Image (tube, rainbow, N blue to C red):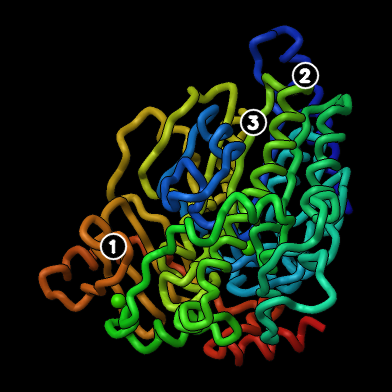
Amino acid sequence: MILKQLRALFSLIYFLFFFSCQSSEQENFVPNVLMISIDDLNDWVGILKANPDVKTPNIDRLAKEGLFYTNAHCQAPICGPSRASVLSGLRPSSTGIYGQIKDQNLRKGNLLMERVRFIPQYFNDHGYKTIGVGKIFHNHAPEGVFEVSGGRKSGFGPLPEKKMNWDKKGTSTDWGTFPNHDSLMHDYGYAQWAKKQLHLEHKRPFFMAVGFIRPHVPWYTTKQWFDLYPPDQITLPSYLPNDWNDLPEIAKQIAFKGMMPTTEWAIEKGQWRKIVQAYLACISFVDHQVGVLLDALESSAYKNNTIVVLWSDHGYELGEKGSFGKQTIWSESTRVPLIFKSPKIKKHQSIHQAVELLDVYPTLLELAGLPANPSNEGKSLVPLLNQKSDSTAVAITTYGKNNHSMINMRYRYIQYENGAEELYDLKNDPEERHNISKILALDSLKKAMRQNLPKTNEDWKVHSYYTINDYFTKTSKQSKKEDK
Ligand SMILES: [Ca+2]
Ligand SMILES: [Ca+2]
C-alpha cells in the first residue's frame, strides 16, 4: 500500500517537473506512444520481402515513415511467454514463464515478476495516461495496468456454427470466409475503439496499446480479403520432405504439433493453397485495421508527437517444416516484423543486425526520453541507428527450460537441454535445411555462439503451462492443475 502511494507521489512529482521544464523549453519533446501488437504474424509483410504475394500497404507505410528491422526475433515462439517477456523486459529463462499463462497469474508465486513494472506501468509511473484494448498480454492485461481499458472479447471469434475444414481438438485452427462483414470481427472493434481514443483530448501524454488477434487461428475473415489472393496465383512456401532426417531426437519431440495439419496432408487434400490464402487474407485484413489506426493518428492532434511501435509476438510456419503452426525454434516461428516510428527517427531506414522483442521496452524508454529501467534485460536499439551492424549480435528464442535457439547475421545455432545441437549457415542455407552442427571445423564457431546462452535457466513456473505438445505435458498437467 505504502509502495503504491509512494509510486503515485513519485509519478505526480515527475509529471509536474516534466511539464514545468517543458513550458520553459518548447523543444522539450513529450511524445505519446502508440504500441500496436499483432498476433501470430510471421515475416510475411511487404517490406520484409519474405513472401512475394502478401499485401500489407499500411504496415509498409508505417515502416517507410520510420525504421524497420529485418532480423527481429521473439523470445518465445508462442503467445503467452512471448508477451510476458516483451512487456516485462525479462527473458523466459529468467522468469520461468515458458508456456501459456493467464494475465492474473503473471506475478503469482514469481518473485522476479512480483517486482517488475510492465511497460505501460513504467510509463504511468512517469506521468503517462495508459490506454489499452485487445490482446496485449495473453488475454488482455492484468488488472489495473491500463487506466482506460477497452477490454478484449474472449476467444478468437466470431465463429461459424461448425468448423469448415479442420476439426481437431486442442486448436482453433480452421480456414474459410466468415463472417460476411468486417464489422463483426473483433479486431474491427479494437481499431474503432482506439480511433475514438486518438480523437479525444488527453491532458497527459498517453501510452496506448492496441492488440490485434488476426492472423491468429482460426483463419476466418471476410471474402474481400480472400479475393486479394486467388489460390492458383499463390506462391507456396518451400518444403523439403526429408528435412527432419538430420535433426536430433529432442528437436523432433519439441517441434511436434499433433493437433495441426501436416504439410503432407495439406498437399494430398489440395488444401495447402487454401490455407496460405486464408493466412494471407487475415494478414491483409489486420493490415487494414492498422491503417485505420494510422489514419486516425494522422488526423489527430497527436500526429507530430507520437512514437509508434509495431510488433508481432512470434512467427508462424505455413508448411515449410512439415506442418502449420508456431511452437518451433526455427526462423519461420521466431522472425517477426518490428517497426518504430518516431519524430526523432529519420524516415525509411532498415537495420539488419539481429535484434530481440526484449529490446522494445528499453528502446521505447530512450525514444520517449524516460530514464532507463535497470531491470530490463534487453538493450535500447536507438544507438544502432548510428553505428555499423554487429554481425555477431544474437537474438535468442527459448522454448521450454534450457532449449535455446539463437541467430546472428550469418548463423542459427540451437542447443537443447540435453546438449543436442543444430547449426545452420544462413548465407548458403537461408531456409535452415542442412544441420551442420556435427562438422568439427565449426566447433570454435559454436563455442563462440554458446557464450551468448543465458546464464540462468529458471525452473518452469507452476502457472505457466503447455497443453499442446507431449514433450511438455508433464509440466503442463501439474501447472494446469495449480492454475484452477
Ligand atoms: Ca501469438
Ligand atoms: Ca534438415
Q: Is residue 133 visible?
A: no
What residue lies at 54% left-to-right and 82% top-to-bottom? 257
Q: Is residue 386 above or below residue 359?
A: above
Q: Quadrant of residue 437?
A: bottom left
x then y, percent, for residue 152: 84, 57
Q: Which residue is mark 1?
A: 449
Q: Which residue is mark 2?
A: 19
In the rendered structure, the answer to whether residue 443 lies left or right of residue 53 reads left
What residue lies at 44% left-to-right and 70% top-to-bottom? 329
Q: Are marks 3 and 1 in contact (CB under 8 Å)?
A: no
**Identity of the amino acid at label 1?**
Met
Q: Quadrant of the N terminus?
A: bottom right
Locate ligand 2 by image quadrant. Answer: bottom left
User: Which mark is nearer the camera, 3 or 2?
Assistant: 3
User: Which mark is nearer the camera, 3 or 1?
Assistant: 3
**Identity of the amino acid at label 3?**
Ile
CA–CA distance in space, label 3 to label 1: 34 Å
x then y, percent, for residue 116: 68, 55
What residue lies at 80% left-to-right and 60% top-to-bottom? 179
Which label belongs to residue 307? 3
User: Which mark is nearer the camera, 2 or 1?
Assistant: 1
Q: Is residue 3 above or below residue 207?
A: below
**Identity of the amino acid at label 2?**
Phe
What residue lies at 88% left-to-right and 24% top-to-bottom? 201
x then y, percent, for residue 339: 54, 40
